[in-house]
Image (spheres, helix red, strand yellow):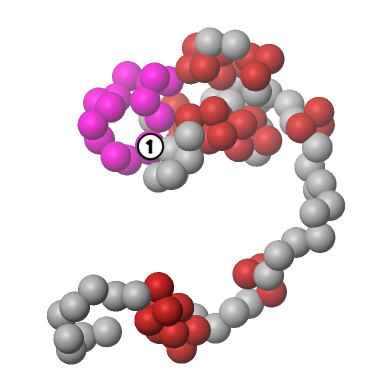
Amino acid sequence: MRGSGGPLTIGRVEEFLDEWAPEIESDRPTSGEVLSPMGSWKFADATCSYVKKWPGLGERNPTDPKGSPPVGHEPLRALAAAKRLGCITEKAGTKHCGHSKRL
């Protein structure tokens, strides 16, 4: 993508991605079927080490990006994903969001 030094358009980015990273099955829209209903999610017996590093859950420096929830995720969404994957205790979830029933 070298050359002009000018701004990239969305179309050019899509062309580049299509050339170097062809579409795969998981790129296509899903059927909308719920594979893991929220009611089936359970809190963990112990919080995973990765989740313990998130701001508000551990003792680490909050300016350190290691262990932070994925960029672009709102905190409650990241906590819900941790619960779905069995990586957060109810106590840690409550401490972080203030109300475990929201998870």
Q: Position of residue 15 (x, y in %)?
A: 44, 84
Magenta segment main secondary structure: loop
- Looking at the image, which residue is at 40% across and 45% down? 71
Q: Going 69% across and 74% down the picture, which residue do you hit?
A: 25
61 within the magenta span: yes
* Residue 13 horizontal side relative to residue 41, left or right: left
Give how far across and how far down residue 100 sits, in percent.
63, 14
Q: Amino acid at mark 1?
A: Ser
Q: Position of residue 56 (x, y in %)?
A: 39, 19
Work out which quarter of the rendered image holds the C terminus and state it.
top right
Residue 62 higher or lower than 72, as above or below: above
Q: Which residue is mark 1?
A: 68
Q: Is residue 46 visible?
A: no
Given residues 83 and 29, the one toward you in this image is: 29
Q: Residue at x 60, y 37 (%)?
A: 81
Position of 37 with respect to 72 (left or right) is: right
| Image side of residue 66 versus residue 63, left or right | right
At x 56% / y 19%, what residue is drawn? 93
- Viewer-side residue, 101 vs 4: 4
Residue 32 picture quarter: bottom right
User: Magenta part of the protein: which range?
Assistant: 54-68
Q: Nearer the viewer, residue 73 or 90?
A: 73
Residue 41 in magenta? no
Give the crowd class for mark 1: few <14, some 14-19, many >=20 residues within 10 Å: some
